[in-house]
């Protein structure tokens, strides 16, 4: 046998085997690279927010192309399901309105506790005007990774990004998270800027300058969808003329009756620029409850509920925020300024901050036949499924408002300006306070 031939054959076989091995490695690398390659969708813009985000699409990923309101935030969601198998990874973005003030590390700790793992890695991604801080959370004994990141946005908003995977493919999770974070884009938000400008104008003018004869009073009867009168709401807003810093005072009484009686009394004290205020609400239901909302220096809003001593929630507000008790004054300035649209953060008497799209509408465009001079639509972006049409007279005072449900046609409430004598006859049990609004404070003191 020719040993030279054998040696050549062996060398050729080894070279061929090595070539096959290298080819297999390259193929495996290409497969892994293709699996981990992140293809993003076109930017998905969130209306009025000044923000767009791209989500993974293709290569096993299927993501929604539209923001949806879920659990107090606007959300984008995508799932990774290669072939016909069940999803092994997911990606989610949450756009959150002004929320409770929590330090970043505390946010990470809350998410860690929710996931039920340990933080094993931290990092930061900077892109444009956004800085995303993130952590990676592992669960012991299982192939699971969660990368959670959060970033502050203009106008006291926040974006949260979370990628989870359950197949031990950390490279996939890293790649998707980084791609989403790098694709974040901050754009102009003209409606938020419009709100900031008109509220700044309102502060510069001062509340006392917008009150007629040192006070502004309102009384409305409330009708249900069958046009039956079921209650009333009355309020008075005055400039006390005192040297006290909180010279503006407001009192309000909201009352409806039916199967259940609902009665709420509010007391509001503010400085002339409403940079600081204290707002108390007391409910006279079967189980008495109360809420105190306090705006302090630097726009810090503190909400405390009765029955929860020592426990308060704190929120950061800004130039787009205004308490709902001052909406009539704001709408008047919007009309005067010819502003067609604005996005305002309305602070409710219950301590919620509800971004609300405000738009002027020509009265003749309304479904109802209205003869009032001005009409404005209020559309809360809180996902509660209703909007409100507000009619104002030539003096820019609210004469009527109609609240409509987006889900139920018969779920409507109508607020019509009324004369005290007429409402007092319908609700004699409250006639004393309807006819003499200056006694509302006495009534509030009696409730508490």
Image (cartoon, rainbow, N blue to C red):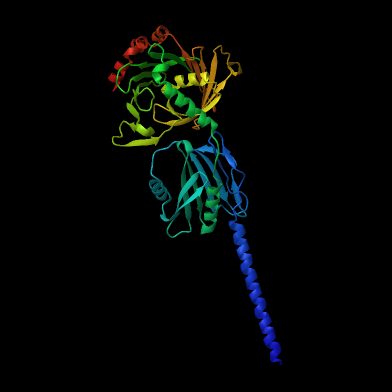
Quarter of the image where one finds residue 276 = top left
> Which quarter of the rendered picture does the N terminus lie within?
bottom right
Quarter of the image where one finds residue 324 = top left
In the rendering, at what x and y percent does residue 195 appear?
A: 49, 28
Q: Which residue occupies 53% across, 35% down?
A: 49
> Which quarter of the rendered picture does the C terminus lie within?
top left
Question: What is the tally of numbered marks visible in this picture?
Answer: 0
Q: Nearer the viewer, residue 240 or 53?
A: 240
* Vertical position of residue 41 compared to residue 382: above or below: below
* Vertical position of residue 45 compared to residue 426: above or below: below
Relative placement, left or right, of 5 versus 217 is right
In the rendering, at what x and y percent does residue 128 appear?
A: 52, 45
Q: Which residue occupies 49% across, 30% down?
A: 384
In the rendering, at what x and y percent does residue 133 appear?
A: 45, 49
Relative placement, left or right, of 317 versus 391 is left
Q: Which residue occupies 39% across, 35% down?
A: 315
In the rendering, at what x and y percent does residue 408 appear?
A: 54, 26
Q: Which residue occupies 65% across, 80% down?
A: 14
Q: Nearer the viewer, residue 97 or 258?
A: 97
Q: Nearer the viewer, residue 8 or 284?
A: 8
Can residue 301 be seen in the rendering of this structure? no
Can residue 340 be seen in the rendering of this structure? yes
* Vertical position of residue 289 compared to residue 161: above or below: above
As drawn, the residue found furthest toward the front would be: 204
């Amino acid at each position: 046998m020719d040993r030279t031939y054998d040696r050549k054959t062996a060398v050729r076989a080894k070279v061929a085997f090595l070539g096959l091995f290298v080819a297999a490695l390259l193929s495996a690398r290409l497969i892994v690279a293709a699996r981990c390659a992140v293809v993003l969708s076109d930017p998905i813009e969130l209306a009025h927010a000044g923000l767009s985000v791209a989500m993974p699409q293709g290569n096993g990923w299927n993501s929604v192309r539209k923001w949806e309101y879920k659990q107090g935030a606007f959300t984008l969601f995508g799932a990774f399901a290669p072939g016909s198998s069940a999803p092994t990874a997911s990606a989610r973005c949450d756009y959150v309105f002004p929320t409770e003030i929590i330090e970043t590390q505390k946010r990470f700790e809350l998410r860690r506790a929710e996931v039920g793992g340990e933080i094993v890695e931290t990092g930061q991604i900077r892109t444009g005007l956004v800085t995303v801080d993130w952590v990676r959370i592992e669960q012991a004994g299982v192939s699971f990774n969660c990368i959670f990141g959060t970033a502050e946005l203009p106008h006291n908003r926040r974006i949260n990004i979370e990628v989870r995977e359950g197949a031990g493919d950390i490279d996939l999770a890293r790649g998707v998270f980084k791609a989403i974070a790098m694709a974040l884009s901050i754009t102009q938000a003209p409606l938020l800027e419009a709100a900031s400008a008109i509220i700044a104008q309102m502060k510069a003018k001062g509340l006392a300058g917008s009150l007629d004869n040192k006070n502004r009073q309102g009384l409305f009867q409330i009708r249900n969808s069958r046009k039956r009168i079921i209650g009333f709401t009355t309020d008075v807003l005055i400039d006390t003329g005192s040297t006290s810093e909180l010279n503006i005072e407001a009192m309000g009484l909201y009352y409806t009756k039916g199967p259940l009686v609902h009665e709420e009394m509010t007391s509001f004290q503010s400085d002339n620029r409403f940079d600081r205020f204290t707002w108390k609400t007391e409910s006279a239901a079967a189980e008495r409850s109360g809420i105190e909302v306090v705006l302090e220096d630097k726009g810090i809003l503190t909400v405390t509920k009765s029955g929860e001593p020592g426990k308060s929630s704190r929120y950061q507000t800004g130039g787009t925020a205004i308490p709902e008790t001052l909406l009539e004054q704001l709408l008047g300035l919007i009309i005067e300024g010819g502003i067609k649209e604005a996005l305002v953060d309305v602070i409710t008497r219950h301590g919620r901050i509800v971004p609300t799209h405000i738009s002027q509408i020509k009265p003749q465009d309304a479904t109802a036949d209205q003869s009032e001079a001005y009409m404005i639509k209020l559309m809360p972006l809180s996902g509660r499924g209703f909007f409100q049409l507000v009619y104002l007279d030539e003096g820019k005072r609210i004469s009527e408002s109609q609240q409509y449900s987006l889900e139920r046609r018969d779920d409507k409430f109508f607020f019509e300006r009324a004369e005290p004598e007429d409402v007092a006859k319908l609700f004699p049990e409250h006639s004393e306070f309807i006819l003499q609004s200056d006694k509302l404070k006495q009534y509030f003191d009696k409730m508490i």
